[in-house]
Amino acid sequence: MRRMIPLAFLVFLVFQTTSSAAQFKPYPGAAVDSKASKEAAEIAKGAGLTGKTTIYTTRDSFEKVFAFYKGAAKEYKMPHEGGPQKLPSGQELKEAYFIFDGGKDITVSKLWIKIQRPYIGGMEIGKDFQVKYKDVRDVTAITVSEQK
């Protein structure tokens, strides 16, 4: 009986480590977008956030990138998600979030990603509250948020 307690504890630790934390791996063939990463870091700093933001892009489809991360991390659904959003151009905006460290949501997670297609580099809200998107590119973006 004495041997079972340490063995059970060891099994518990191994299970906890493997079930609650995963390591981020860049999507194969995705490249870091240095300009977008720098801009995202400046926005985060301006908002008082610490940590690191890195943006990768790939020409591969949203679905292919989603499938790659689906088995590697826990998908997180945003509470406000209704149906698919459309850009003024008519193009559908696709988004998904994945948590790698077992956090309950992205507000407490130290490592999470957002997958999005198309990439939107920014937006302005003009008169009449019309949203104008800037730097819209037909690529799949993977935004990695690492908090301290």
Image: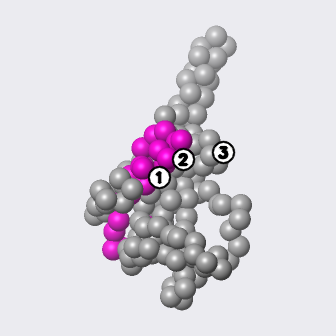
Nearest to the observer: residue 53 or residue 24: 53
| Amino acid type, label 2 | Ala
Nearest to the observer: residue 71 or residue 25: 25
* For the residues bearing labels 1 and 2, Cβ distance under 8 angstroms: yes
Nearest to the observer: residue 98 or residue 138: 138
How far is disc 1 from disc 2 in space, using C-alphas? Answer: 6 Å
Marker disc for residue 122: none
Residue of label 3: 104
**Residue appearing at x 47%, y 67% in the figure:** 122
Q: Left or right: where does residue 33 sit relative to residue 115?
A: left
Residue of label 2: 47
Q: Where in the figure is residue 51, as x and y percent of width and height?
A: 46, 40
Q: Judge whether residue 144 can be spotted in this image.
A: no
**Residue appearing at x 60%, y 29% in the figure:** 12
| Amino acid type, label 1 | Ile
Task: Say which label, 2 or 3, has the lower sequence index.
Answer: 2
The part of the image, by quadrant, that contains residue 26 is bottom left
* Secondary structure type for disc 2: loop
Asked if 120 appears above or below 48 in the picture, the reply is: below
| Amino acid type, label 3 | Lys
Q: Left or right: where does residue 101 sit relative to residue 84?
A: left
The part of the image, by quadrant, that contains residue 82 is bottom right
* For the residues bearing labels 3 and 1, Cβ distance under 8 angstroms: no
* Secondary structure type for disc 1: helix
Residue of label 1: 43
Within-10-Å neighbours for mark 2: few <14, some 14–19, many 20+: few
Q: Judge whether residue 118 can be spotted in this image.
A: yes
* For the residues bearing labels 2 and 3, Cβ distance under 8 angstroms: no
Q: Where in the figure is residue 89, as x and y percent of width and height?
A: 50, 88
Quadrant of image for the N terminus: top right
Within-10-Å neighbours for mark 3: few <14, some 14–19, many 20+: few
Q: Which residues are magenta?
A: 40-65
